[in-house]
Every structure is written in C-alpha cells, then in structure tokens.
Image: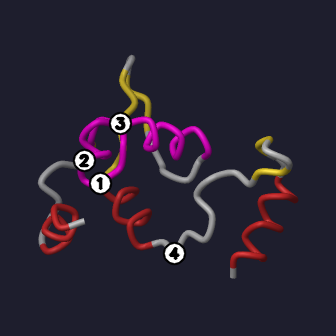
C-alpha cells in the first residue's frame, strides 16, 4: 500500500497499469487482480490485446472496505449466486 499511498499524494505517474503492475501496487497476486477484474470489483479497459487498469480504479479499490473478497463456500463447494454472496456479506458485518 505504501507505493499506492505515494501515488495518491500527487498526480498519478501513469494513467493505466498492466495487471502485473496493478498487482504490485495493491500488494496482491496477478491471479487475484485477474479475479477482481473478472468479477467487476476492479475496473479495467481492454486496449488491443492488453487489459489495462486505470489509476482511479486502483485508488477506489484500495479505499473500499471489502467484507468478502472470495466467494462463499457451502459443503466445500464454491457458491456463485448473487443471493448467497449478499448473505455472506451480511453475516460478515
């Protein structure tokens, strides 16, 4: 978060970041960043064959208070319904 905090102090050094660069700024793995993008939890843009993440999306994600980043599990299986996700978030708070 320290690198992202430094980026928050002034104008962003860059407007768009690759998934690898975003993962480094957020202190997450590249696969986690990919999961966040695919679930719509982290905004991105596709430019040609590249998926780029805007600086503003990184800042917004870093400032969110996420109660549940991972999908809930039931009997060892991942549950992927909107209702179960909402229920898991209510139970976590």
Q: Residues within 10 Å of mark 4 (few under 14, many from 20)?
A: few
Q: Which residue is mark 1?
A: 27
The answer to whether marks 3 and 1 mark residues whose Cβ atoms lie closer than 8 Å is no
- Label 3 vs label 1: CA separation? 17 Å
Q: Image height check: is 75 above or below 50?
A: below
Range drawn in magenta: 17-39
Dot in front, 3 or 4: 4
Q: Residues within 10 Å of mark 2 (few under 14, many from 20)?
A: some
Image check: 89 left or right of 27? right
Q: Earlier in the sequence, mark 4 or mark 1?
A: 1
Q: Which residue is mark 2?
A: 24
- Label 4 vs label 1: CA separation? 16 Å
- Label 3 vs label 4: CA separation? 23 Å
The answer to whether marks 1 and 2 mark residues whose Cβ atoms lie closer than 8 Å is yes
Residue 23 on the magenta segment: yes
Residue 81 on the magenta segment: no
Q: Earlier in the sequence, mark 3 or mark 2?
A: 2
Dot in front, 4 or 1: 1
Among all residues in the image, which is located at the extreme front? 75
Q: Image height check: is 1 above or below 57?
A: below
Which secondary structure class fits the magenta region best?
A: helix
Q: Residues within 10 Å of mark 3 (few under 14, many from 20)?
A: many
Instruction: Give the label on residue 65, or none.
Output: 4
Q: Which residue is mark 3?
A: 52
Q: Earlier in the sequence, mark 2 or mark 4?
A: 2
């Amino acid at each position: 978060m320290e690198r992202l905090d430094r980026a928050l102090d002034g104008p962003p050094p860059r407007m768009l970041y690759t998934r690898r660069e975003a993962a480094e700024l957020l202190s997450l793995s590249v696969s986690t960043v990919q999961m966040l993008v695919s679930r719509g939890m982290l905004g991105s843009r596709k430019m040609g064959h590249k998926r780029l993440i805007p600086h503003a999306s990184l800042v917004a994600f870093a400032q969110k208070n996420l109660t549940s980043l991972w999908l809930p599990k039931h009997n060892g299986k991942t549950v992927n319904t909107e209702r179960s996700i909402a229920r898991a978030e209510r139970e976590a708070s």
